[in-house]
Image (cartoon, rainbow, N blue to C red):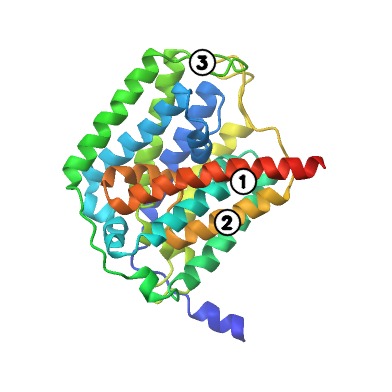
Amino acid sequence: EHSHQLMASIHIASTFSPIPATIGGLMIGLASSNLLRSSGRIFGVSGLLRSIRGSPWRQACVSGMIFGGGVTSWALGANSVWEGVYAAQTLSPVIPCLAGLLVGFGTTLSSGCTSGHGVCGLARFSPRSLVAVPTFMATGMITASYASHIDPLLVHTQLHFPTVPPNLAVAASSIVALAVIARATGNPINTSPTLEQDSPRTVIASAISGTIFGSGLAISGMCNPSKVLGFLDPFSAAGWDPSLCFVMGSALFITVPAFQFKPETPRLRKTWELPTTTAITPQLIIGSALFGVGWGLAGICPGPGLVNIATGTVGMLLWIVFLWIGMRLGVRAGSLFEKTKGH
């Protein structure tokens, strides 16, 4: 009887937008498939960020995301695409800092996020992703459902941070992103001597994939934290927004056949760079759970977080800084897990 009452309390929110969610999801799937087929690589945003230093193709891909997502958000109307980001400017900085820290730490420990484990991992039928995705979905939903009960003094402090005008923020981030892409294309050499070297063509292909991916995130509505939280909290008084189901489903519609029927070699390189680990480890489960908690706190995962740099808001910049700190801590924690396992 209790379960029937819970189901009866769920109603669809007015923000539900299946058509933009499906179009955006198809673009995300196309971008992921293009990176796979052209360069033989996984489009995992947290992985791109963790290893971005000394890797021109990753720098180009991430910059493409910021450029594509920022320009598309501006074209669609920054105030609507980033409604939740601007609204969060009245919140305490504790929330973006803690959320960014947990997302960075968790995705590093579990080696993936909604893109690496979700869009690509599920498409590869990866055993690790089949564990990671339900784990972070569950902890994300639990956290989002109870986040409204957090001490109001911690959440609503009415600290009105200064906001950069959208036109200026998007223009500045786009110029920087295009400059990084140009530099990476001109010098595509990886610093790792053990990997096959890239060419300007693979760097350009990575930038194109990133641009499409970022645009897809903006169109789908996933750059709006309040919309994501509307999915993660099915029992919200405002109703449940299942748009994310359409985003993930349409992305997988593209990536499943791309991964399952891939050619012998990528178009632009000779070798594949795909994950080979299949072990279900404690750090995978713990990392996925912590990522879900961070995601449920603020409604932001690594992909939308990168695109939202173009808002120029203090809250998003704090989230990115603490994401990076969390990733550094996650690397150290991962090393401790390996040492413990060795003993």
| Amino acid under disc 3 | Leu
In which quarter of the view is residue 204 placed? top left
SS under mark 3: loop
1 or 3: tag closer to the N-terminus:
1
- The picture places residue 3, in percent across and down from the top left corner, at 60, 80
Q: Distance between the Cα atoms at labels 1 and 3?
A: 31 Å
| Label annotation for residue 109 | 1
User: Residue 144's spot in the image, x, y percent?
Assistant: 48, 67
Residue at the spot 52% in from the left edge and 43% down from the top edge = 327
Q: Earlier in the sequence, mark 3 or mark 2?
A: 3
The amino acid sitting under disc 1 is: Leu
Nearer-the-camera pick, 250 or 107? 107
Q: Residue at 23%, 62% (x, y): give it.
A: 160
Looking at the rendered image, the quarter that the N terminus falls into is bottom right
| Left or right placement of residue 86 versus residue 337 in this view | left
Q: Residues within 10 Å of mark 1 (few under 14, many from 20)?
A: many
Label 3, label 2: how many angstroms apart (C-alpha)?
A: 37 Å
Q: Nearer the viewer, mark 1 or mark 3?
A: 1
Evaluate if marks 2 and 1 touch, with contact meaning CB atoms under 8 Å apart: yes
Which residue is situated farthest in the right direction here?
343
Task: Label 1, secondary structure: give it.
Answer: helix
Kindly identify the amino acid type of the residue bearing the numbered disc 2: Leu
Cα distance between the residues tagged 2 and 1: 9 Å
Label 3, residues with CA under 10 Å away: few <14, some 14-19, many ≥20:
some
**The label number, if any, that marks residue 290 in the structure image:** 2
For mark 3, what is the residue?
268
